[in-house]
Amino acid sequence: MRQIIIWTALSTVTLFYFSWPPLPAVFLLFVAIVPLFLAYHKLPFWSWLLAVFLTLFGWNTSTTYWLYNTLPVGSFFVHIINSIIFSLPFVVFWLAEKRFNRSAGYLNFAFAWLSLEYLQLNWDLGYPFMNLGNGVSMYPEIFQWYEYTGALGGSLWILVINILASELCLYWIHQHALDVRKLISLTAVLLIPLVFSIFRYNTYQENGKTCSVAIVSPAIDCYNEKYQKDLDWLTDTYLLQCKEINNPDFILWPETAIPDAGLSDALNENPFLEKIRNGLNKSTNSSLITGAIIYKKHGFDPEEKANKTYYQPLNEYLSTHNSAIEIKRDGPIRIIRTKMILVPFEETVPYPKLLGWLRKMVGTLGGFTFSYLDEGAGFVQYRETKATPLICYETVGPSWG
């Protein structure tokens, strides 16, 4: 039994690992869950559930191991929580299969999995990196139909193919024969979306308006260097690279490129931001869109003190925000928006009233605990077009609007 648990977990983790970006074997994703469904018929429930948990934890850890470069304890919490959460659809499968039949088990399993992926996109403990639909992201030619279904449609596609492949394998194991109907169903479910997507990818033509964008991203180690350097050095580094740019419509600097932009209501009095504005090419009409950490005052004794820090020189509590701001030579410095989807235990402690006690244990990246600030224009204007920057982690979540 122990060997079955180990080999099931190892085989499934291996399939997930080699199919997950940036590795190229994406086709393995369509059979990655099959070993777990096959092991279901060989193991007692609790042993099978252990294999499921070990698989999910191994998948999370092996494919997003780089999180441990930031905060090992916080990353461990995220991986444990995500593995426990996605063990639940397998429990739902077991309950429905015992109460009704295997088909009902599969149906409830897929519904539970997709429900949890949706939850991951919309709650403060969200970790949408591991949503199955993201697994094909290296190959845009095969998921063009996401414009209609979103990435959850891709997750459903992958789940259904895994289920059909599991049934095909079980039939072969028990009957020593190939079930042609199941094979045809599997082939159709795989190929119909695939053929549509490839056709769409190769026939689509861009008709929208264009603008020029220059991205400035110096090789600054954000873990061991960026937050230790002074602002003069950082701004000089970015501005030096900007001198090589030939008047684009927008210049983009990275997330938190300015680690201290000061108070949200005093951006235009900040000498470092003024230095950046003066450092832009005098002949340029470019808008500089940069990440910046800003602070908002909340008075001496705010009702809600979670995710706020007392700042003695001002005798007030401050909240900290991961923001995007716009700097132009001929206009005021303004907040565009602040980051809404924050990395749990890396950028913020979610549900601080309930989990605030974890703050000292897990820490946060750069020593900051961010929160959302409902301020800013929400967009930048280019002629008749409006656009908004997504900040890092937000690109794997639902579109900001």
Image (tube, rainbow, N blue to C red):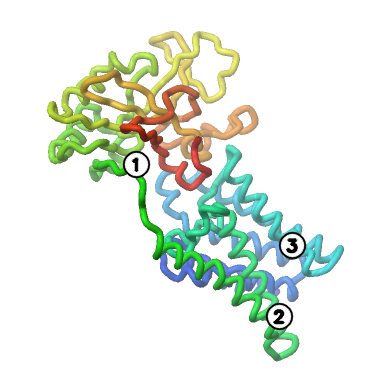
The structure residue drawn at horizontal position 50% and vertical position 70%, both measured from the top left corner, is 195
Relative image position of residue 226 (x, y in whole percent): 29, 36
Q: Which mark is residue 170?
A: 2
Relative image position of residue 138 (x, y in whole percent): 42, 61
Q: Earlier in the sequence, mark 3 or mark 2?
A: 3
Labels 1 & 3 near each other (Cβ < 8 A)? no
Q: Which mark is residue 223?
A: 1
- Regarding mark 2 in the picture, which secondary structure is present there? helix
Residue that sits furthest to the bottom in the current view: 176
Q: With 316 as the anchor, is 182 left or right in this view?
A: right
Q: Amino acid at mark 1?
A: Tyr
Residue 170 found in image quarter: bottom right
Residue named by callout 3: 107
Q: With 399 as the anchor, is 95 left or right in this view?
A: right
Labels 3 & 2 near each other (Cβ < 8 A)? no
Q: Earlier in the sequence, mark 1 or mark 3?
A: 3
In this rendering, the count of numbered labels is 3
